[in-house]
Image: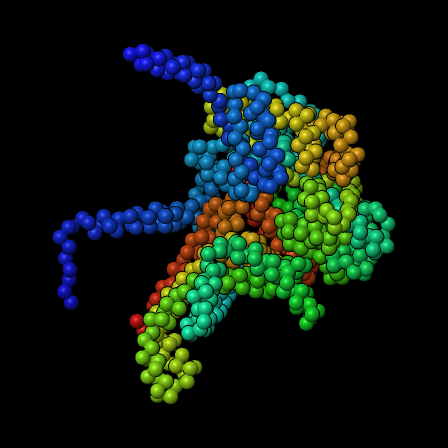
Amino acid sequence: MKRSVFPNRWLPYLLVGPQVIITLVFFFWPAFESLRLSLYRASPFGDRLIYVGLTNFERLFRDDAYLRSVITSFVFSFVVTFAGLALALLLASMANARIRGLAVYRSLLLWPYGIAPAIAGIIWLFVFHPSYGILPWLLSFVTAYQFNWFLKGWVAMALIIVAAIWKQFGYNLAFYLAGLQAIESSVLEAASVDGAGPIRRFFAITFPLLSPVTFFLFTLNMTFSFFDTFGLVHAVTQGGPGDATSILVYRAWRDGFEGLQLGYSAAQSVVLMALVIMLTAFQFRFAEKKVTY
Amino acid sequence: MKALLARTVALLAVAVLVSPSAALARTDIQWWHAMTAVLGERINEIAAKFNASQNDYEVKAVYKGSYPDTLNAAIAAYRAKQPPHIVQVYEVGTQTMLSSGAVYPVFQLVKDHGVTIDWNDVIPPVKSYYASGGNLYSMAFNSSTPVLFYNKDLFKKAGLPDRAPTTWDEVEAAARKLVASGARCGFSAAWPSWTLMENMHALHDQPFADHANGFDGLATTLKINGPFGVKMMELLQRGAKEGWFTYNGRLNKAEANMGNGECGVFLSSSAYIGNLTRASEGKFTWATGPLPRMGGFPQGSSIIGGATLWVLKGAKPEEYRGVAQFFRYLASTENQAWWAGVTGYLPISNSAVKAMEASGHFQKNPQQRTAITQMQLGKVTPNSQGIRLGNFPSVRDAIEEQMENIFSGKKTAKQGLDDAVAKSSDILKEFAALYK
């Protein structure tokens, strides 16, 4: 392969400059600040800053509730990611078929992505609400079970999972649709000629060919569900009942923003950051081997 | 030539006309607040009326989001050395503000600028909650206290007499009858920690935290796992199990259930009167009563919630002069009576209460009387003067988390409260360590 050489030595740096500066200012600098702050006990108005070493981290790992929160977060993120991707893939396959009014149908499916997580939470709150929600009302015809998420942890968890999946759904669907359309129809036709049915074709051809998209969406949904969901939790459950929906990012947000325990909250952000870096590295190390580009 | 001359004269005339108004430039005063909807409109009204009343200062009321949003915005602005002059901070932020070293105490500000506000006229529960060493560090503004609401229509349907239950035994009996007669929610409460824990302890003269609820020094541990707290939580746990108490979430989420006519007996802030009036219009009738009492415990007083106005350091002297003038305006009997009348918050001065009586306001709005009567009948003791905790928002979260575990039957009342105390101690000790 022939390498192109640009005559101007500075132009490339100038072109990547803005991106690098944005990354440094908006990502690296805050991340570094969190790291630094996590070693301090800091007052809200900034008049006291006491170096405490790893005390904030010690306080975290001493707390059973924090360890429970780690588990809650993983359950939440894995369910949101796996169920969300499976659903998006299923609907994308259907939307990929040649049917009348396809453009309208596709546009409608993309809508939820335009909605902020907190608003998505409120919408689902109306659906699930124990007294005026439509779902508990419909269920009351089938069962006497009280679906009150104010007191039943698993119902609350189901609620925020559904809302998060719904919120990410349009995004996932868009990528899967694009991926499906990039698959050469000749490959699928050849398989049909060889006698493979639709399900066989899907698993033997479509799914492997979609693996780069799946991998990308997997990483993205993981980070979304770990980092971007505090607005949703805050709008719907405030982490309750008890601490059933108190995921890591919500705890960090609440202790920092509402509780004004800045050092403690920074320590939580650092732990969260480390967890997600590990998870992403793990994905790239192992899962990516199964991806065919 | 003549035309040019005429034009020059005209220009000069304009310049002469314009310049005096430039000399009258007003000093801006930034007032950051967290009041939405009707309350936000009232705030703008106050600012506009003050601005129209004089020519030197222009109060600019700026809505900054929820209470935590507003406090965070003020903190960020203060750290960036661009603080607002006045910021509205909720009651749970009081200790944070007092310890911050960032405030210009209001009693001092007023004195420094030769303005007189009769602090002795401030009603005792408000003064005791916010004063430190007898002085108000922030300007009392919007204060409320919880009261009991009951749905008259549901009471009638259940065959109950048309009066508010006054004890917990009566609440339970009424709620049982209500549920038996088909009501979906016999009893419920908004702001769970504030109405059911903080206020119930104060009302029954029970300590909430050590160091006299944080008034004699920074509190380091809660005392809510004593016999009273356990009894209160056991009652509600049983209520949830037996179906006469419905838990409807944190913050004011439960107000949705009262507002749609589902709940028979309900506890929430007296400032909910305005919204409930609107929500119930043409659907059902309701009335208020004092908070229910539990037998066998002494009389204390209910405590307040809401917010006060804090003045931040870092502004110019002439701006502070304007703030002092504005506070004098706010504190006037006329303005206090107006504010309480249109919002349902407590009038914060005795003279405003008298003015409202005199104008017949309470005859027309008898429901607004309940909170004032309840406060006047209360006994201010070390346990009922208020609760002042560092990191109070986090402490409240810790308490409400365990209340949910108790109501759902996951933990016994004692176990849940012990856990809340342990978690809170951790949070309180952090705050104490920061300001030791």
Q: Where is residue B18 in the image (x, y as percent from the top left)?
A: 43, 18
Q: Position of residue B279 (x, y in %)?
A: 69, 47
> Which quarter of the figure has residue A273?
bottom left
> Which quarter of the figure has residue A208?
bottom left
Pick the residue in front: A88 or A149: A88
Which residue is painted at 68% across and 30% down in the image? B338
Quadrant where the N terminus of chain B is found in the figure: top left
Which residue is painted at 52% across and 20% down in the image? B56
Task: Give left or right: position of B185 versus B9.
Answer: right
Identify the coloring: rainbow
**The furthest residue to the front:** B2
Which residue is painted at 70% across and 53% down in the image? B260
The answer to whether residue B387 is above or below residue A80 is: above
**Total numbered labels:** 0
Which residue is painted at 56% across and 39% down in the image? B34
**The furthest residue to the bottom:** A195
Q: Can residue B265 be seen in this view?
A: no
Q: Position of residue A19 (x, y in %)?
A: 30, 50
Pick the residue in front: A254 or B249: B249
Task: Give left or right: position of B93 versus B350.
Answer: left
Q: Can residue B50 be seen in this view?
A: yes
Task: Give left or right: position of A14 versus A38.
Answer: left
Pick the residue in front: A85 or B21: B21
Task: Give left or right: position of A290 versus B154.
Answer: left
Q: Where is residue A128 in the image (x, y as percent from the top left)?
A: 61, 61
Pick the residue in front: B400 or B308: B308
